[in-house]
Amino acid sequence: MSDPTHQVIADNEIKRLTLRFRDPVKEARYRAATRELNLRQARLALVVALALNLPFAAMGPVMFQAYQTEIMIAQGIGMTAYTGMLLGLTYLAYFRTRWPLLMVALVLGFAEFYAAINVIGAGPPLVVAGFMLLLMGVYVLVPLIFMYGAVCAELATVLYLASIWWGGTLSDVELVALALQLLSANVIGVVMLYRRELFQRRDFASDEIIENERRRYHELLTSILPASVADRLQRGERVVDDVADSTVLFADIVGFTRIAAAHPPEQVLGLLDRVFATFDRLVEKHGLEKIKTIGDAYMVAGGVAQAHDRHDTAVADLALDMRDMVAGMTAPDGGRLGVRIGIHTGPLIAGVIGETRFLYDLWGDTVNTASRMEAAGEAGSIQVSDAVRARLADAYDFAARGDIEVKGKGRMRTWYLIGRRDDAAAAE
């Protein structure tokens, strides 16, 4: 793990004696996360056992010529069929979570087989090497968790030694020497198995920490940026888009400067919070993107961060909802609130600026014109450009304001958005 802090946190979550997570829920997640991987590893162990058993089965009759038939039947047929059966059982639904039983059966079966060969072959020198390979497989290849793996290997060793002792093929001194060798092999294997599982659990805990940090980072990004933009940033992309068609809305609270001067800061901030929280819910409802707030100004766009087939109608519906919502609110002095809204549609550039404090923003004449529509509008009105009116004339009612002087644009024909035509028909 690259971050020492993650390693310390991960270590504190693990019970070092039993190799279990302190949190039972995390232990269950670890088991679930490794279940399929371990099942595949178990199948691999069985395939390797099958493959390695074949050359030994071929050599057995040569090594033990006095027992050629017995060795051929036991190893060539019996152990091959036994291992193949265990492999087949891993594909049954019952053993998808109970494959450790099959691993234990594999190890104990081979241990007893090697012990039997030792007994009938009257001498362990060649067979001991095969049993050592079995122990190595338990500690390295067979995917049993530490406690099960250690117990399984030790049980196999006891079974092997007990069978040799019962067969009487070794003197007491030779049996003690063999037991010490196998004990040493088990000690080395236990240390290896312990460290392997400890590192696996530590990596799992560290990965969860990293994933939680990544998720919190993404949540932070999506709280200040559109979700699609946050995703692109996390992928390392530079977010700069040339948007061919979009709709931009600006809104601000009428008389906010007067309200701010006449009331305590906490009341002013409380008012802004109520109004902007309502706007946020409406923006989400209409599938648009909140771009930013500047003082009491609120900026929204459609068709920028993600495709929106009818961003113009969505912005128009949002403006009508914003106007009606604010009309039902009161200022700290009890007076009715009003909102001034401006809308324009057209091409623009969208992107993220900054390296530590990201800001998703829009640039271009469309943005400037929308801002001018709001600034030159009247209290309680939704002023739109002629381009917006041309797009929405079939579905919305407009009132002509006429030509007005717009800063940086000269004379422009503008309109007031009154409402949807279907709403007017329903009211009648």
Image (spheres, rainbow, N blue to C red):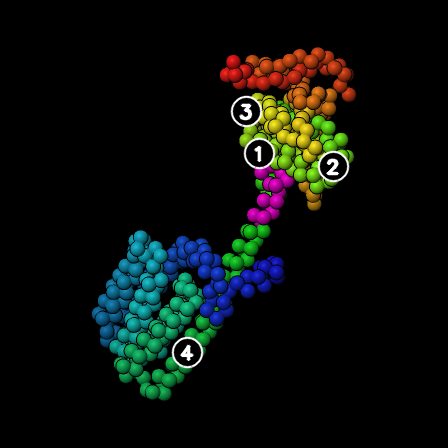
Q: Which circle's residue, 3 or 2, is located before the other in the chain?
A: 2
Q: Are marks 4 and 2 in contact (CB under 8 Å)?
A: no
**Amino acid, disc 2:** His
Image quadrant occupied by the N terminus: bottom right
Find residue 183 and report its horizontal and vertical position in percent. 41, 78
Q: Tell me the number on the disc at residue 183.
A: 4
Find residue 141 and report its horizontal and vertical position in percent. 42, 63
Q: In terms of secondary structure, what is the magenta stretch mainly?
A: helix
Q: Which residue is mark 1?
A: 281
Q: Tell me the number on the disc at residue 309.
A: 3
**Amino acid, disc 1:** Arg
Q: Are marks 4 and 1 in contact (CB under 8 Å)?
A: no
Find residue 289 and report its horizontal and vertical position in percent. 61, 32
User: How far apart, in angstroms, are the residues tagged by discs 3 and 2?
Assistant: 43 Å
Give left or right: position of 365 versus 305. right
Label 1 residue SS:
helix
Give left or right: position of 206 versus 271. left
**Amino acid, disc 3:** Asp
Q: Which residue is mark 2?
A: 263
| Viewer-nearest of discs 2 and 1 | 2
User: How far apart, in angstroms, are the residues tagged by discs 3 and 1?
Assistant: 21 Å
Label 4 residue SS:
helix
**Amino acid, disc 4:** Leu
Within 10 angstroms of label 4, few (less than 14), some, or many (20 or more) residues? some
Find residue 342 and report its horizontal and vertical position in percent. 67, 23
